[in-house]
Image (cartoon, rainbow, N blue to C red):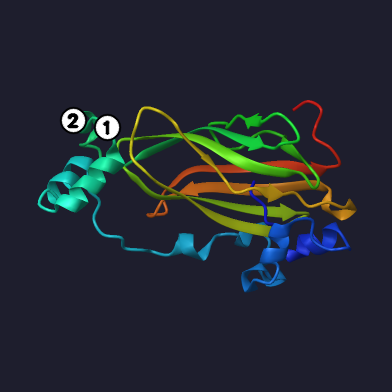
Amino acid sequence: MSFPWRPLLMSLAVGAGPSSSNMDDKAGSAEKTTTNHRPESDDDNEEENRNLHLGPQYTLKEQLEKDKDDESLRKWKEQLLGGVDINNIGETLEPEVKFLSVAIVSPDREDIVLSIPADGKPEGLWFTLKEASHYRLKFSFQVSNNIVSGLRYTNTVWKTGVKVDSTKDMIGTFSPQLEPYTHEMPEETAPSGFLARGSYTAKSKFLDDDNKCYLEINYTFDIRKDWAATE
């Protein structure tokens, strides 16, 4: 859902050139060449497939106890944890991240708040983007049990079976708390032009440093001349 739009799509979209400054900045990157346009079956990210050894995990109580003699590190962890009641949740090893909503925020219209099915597979068309529109993605999520480290967002987009974009964005590290977190992604600009319009398929994932996936969404969306009237 966050689309810098690779050169293949840019060349399809408008003969006069890219539709956003983001495209100009990224078009020269070696990572953005058309050699990355592969069928959907090959979309597994190499980074996600590596067997990384990141060391042992600890509960919150164990982490604080382990560093009790290092005052600066202990204070940093206490600051990160904020007002969390360690006595209630500190014995759980694995963090839990629950995404409550995903919204498309654009100055052109009211926010589009998207419901997330439990299976991560919205039926039919999930949303429509207006061509050349400026927008941001806004995620609302809750963290419980333990600290989630290096939460990141990946997104892959295909049009007519051709991979046109692959994006990775860092969200951050979060301590457990009762109140939901809200995170807004950088602004993007949808492409424009006759060939850019149409239907797309996409896959979004939210993973941590251990490549644990907390949510995977497989969906379809459209780019049209205007926003969908029903949204």
Q: Secondary structure at mark 1?
A: loop
- In-front residue for pair 177/54: 177
Q: Amino acid at mark 2?
A: Asn
Q: Is residue 171 above or below residue 176?
A: below
Residue 146 in view here:
no
Give residue 93's quadrant in the image: top left
Give residue 24's quadrant in the image: bottom right
Around disc 2, counting alpha carbons within 10 Å, would you say few (fewer than 14), some (14 to 19), or many (20 or more)? few
Around disc 1, counting alpha carbons within 10 Å, would you say few (fewer than 14), some (14 to 19), or many (20 or more)? some
- Report x, y in % for residue 176: 33, 36
Disc tally is: 2
The CA span between labels 1 and 2 is 9 Å
Q: Secondary structure at mark 2?
A: helix
- What residue did someone put label 1 on? 84
- Report x, y in % for residue 28: 69, 72
- Report x, y in % for residue 227: 80, 35
